[in-house]
């Protein structure tokens, strides 16, 4: 397999890196995090100008029809710069629209940067099981009434439209009976509680009190939304794997630089062989994670759902193991400084921790991988 970037991918990578290095510095990022809004309209505008919002959107809707591999390049750079803008939430929402079909107008708005999306999927009782849904969608003659609460919706407070999973039939943990809807964030009956997460991003708990939506708000077939939800979640997990790789690269670089400058007994601590061995293992872990993230990006669009699930879960689990090792070792090698807001290591570690917990943690994906058809026979 050719792992070299295409000229177009290299252009996206270089443009993003220049923007982050020049205009999205660590100090500037901290100011954004502690601002009232928690995100930057100016930074979002730059991402739009660079074509990032148009990248995953089909050409027919004004996009570049970028693949998951193209998105891997972008997400690695965003991870390196620990960018807190609502990009991941928006492109994940766009994937729902693409898989469902018939949402050309909204996709055009995403491509132009006019519309930000968020996926309201998780509930407090569900942990990582996205099919565990108590939010209900009651059918009426002219649409649906949605009631329930979604928790920790990434950038739910900044979105103009919400992708909402709700149960229109079946028991609480059935995969049958799940319907997906696109709901205006300012619709009557929608209440959002916005807050900052430990990694500096924004999330919201969102309550739906008899929110009335038209039949046209339904994504896909009524009660048949699980396949779309499952595939879109795998796409999101793949993007998170790529972001984690970028964050680990930056964290390894910062740690190596610290070992070269921090002195003890009159010499840089990087001269100590034991620390060199740990640093080498950190780089090995990041490279293994990079390989799995790349494989997931290649396979996430596979027509074979079992193959997609196996590969994405294997990648999310392996990346989760790697980010935990790299993050913990980096903090320890930095000493007490590693947990302070003054150094980038603490911020990268927090973001890596949240990536592991988003769309299924390591244990969840190990169990999902083992549950896939053919695993026991192959073993």
Image: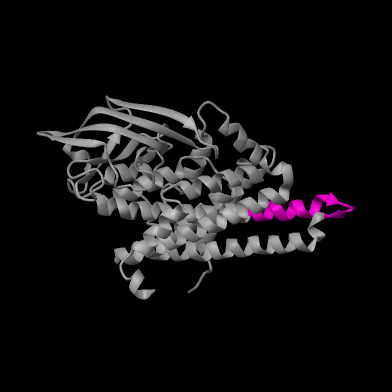
Q: Residue at x 80, y 60 (%)?
A: 272
Is the C terminus in the top left, top right, bottom left or bottom right quadrant?
A: bottom left
Magenta range is 250-268
Q: Position of residue 212 (x, y in %)?
A: 21, 29
Asked whether residue 140 is drawn in magenta, I would say no
Q: Residue at x 41, y 60 (%)?
A: 312
- Between 82 and 6, the one lying in front of the other is 82
Q: Main secondary structure of the magenta part?
A: helix
For residue 183, side relative to residue 76 (left or right): left
Q: Residue at x 41, y 49 (%)?
A: 359
- Between 26 and 105, the one lying in front of the other is 26
Q: Residue at x 46, y 40 (%)?
A: 86
* Above or below, comparing residue 183 to residue 235 in the picture: above
- Between 11 and 164, the one lying in front of the other is 164
Q: Position of residue 353 (x, y in %)?
A: 54, 47
Asked whether residue 252 is drawn in magenta, I would say yes
Residue 218's image quarter?
Answer: top left
Residue 160 visible in the picture? yes
Q: Position of residue 24 (x, y in %)?
A: 60, 41
For residue 249, side relative to residue 131 (left or right): right
């Amino acid at each position: 397999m050719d792992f070299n970037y295409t000229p177009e991918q290299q252009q996206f990578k270089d443009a993003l890196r220049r923007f982050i290095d020049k205009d999205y510095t660590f100090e500037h990022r901290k100011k954004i995090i502690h601002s009232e809004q928690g995100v930057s309209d100016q930074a979002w505008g730059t991402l739009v100008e660079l074509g990032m919002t148009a990248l995953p959107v089909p050409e027919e809707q004004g996009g570049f029809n970028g693949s998951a591999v193209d998105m891997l390049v972008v997400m690695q750079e965003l991870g390196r710069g620990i960018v807190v803008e609502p990009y991941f939430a928006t492109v994940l929402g766009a994937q729902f629209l693409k898989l469902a079909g018939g949402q050309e107008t909204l996709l055009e708005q995403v491509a132009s940067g006019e519309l930000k999306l968020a996926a309201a999927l998780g509930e407090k009782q569900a942990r990582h099981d996205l099919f565990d849904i108590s939010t209900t969608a009651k059918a009426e003659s002219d649409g649906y009434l949605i009631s329930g609460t979604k928790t920790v919706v990434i950038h739910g407070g900044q979105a103009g439209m919400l992708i909402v999973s709700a149960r229109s039939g079946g028991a609480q943990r059935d995969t049958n009976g799940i319907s997906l809807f696109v709901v205006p964030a300012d619709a009557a009956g929608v209440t959002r509680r916005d807050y900052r997460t430990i990694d500096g991003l924004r999330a919201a708990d969102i309550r739906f009190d008899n929110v009335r939506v038209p039949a046209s708000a339904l994504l896909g077939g009524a009660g048949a939304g699980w396949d779309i939800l499952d595939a879109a979640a795998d796409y999101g997990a793949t993007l998170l794997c790529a972001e984690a790789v970028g964050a680990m690269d930056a964290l390894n670089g910062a740690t190596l630089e610290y070992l070269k400058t921090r002195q003890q007994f009159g010499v840089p601590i990087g001269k100590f062989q034991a620390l060199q061995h740990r640093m080498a293992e950190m780089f090995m872990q990041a490279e293994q994670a990079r390989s799995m993230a790349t494989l997931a990006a290649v396979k996430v669009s596979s027509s074979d759902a079992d193959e997609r699930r196996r590969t994405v879960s294997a990648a999310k689990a392996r990346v989760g193991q790697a980010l935990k090792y790299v993050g913990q070792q980096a903090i320890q090698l930095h000493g007490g400084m590693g947990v302070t807001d003054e150094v980038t290591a603490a911020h990268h570690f927090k973001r890596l921790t949240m990536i592991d917990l988003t769309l299924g943690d390591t244990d969840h994906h190990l169990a999902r991988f083992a549950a896939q058809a053919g695993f026991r026979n192959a073993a």
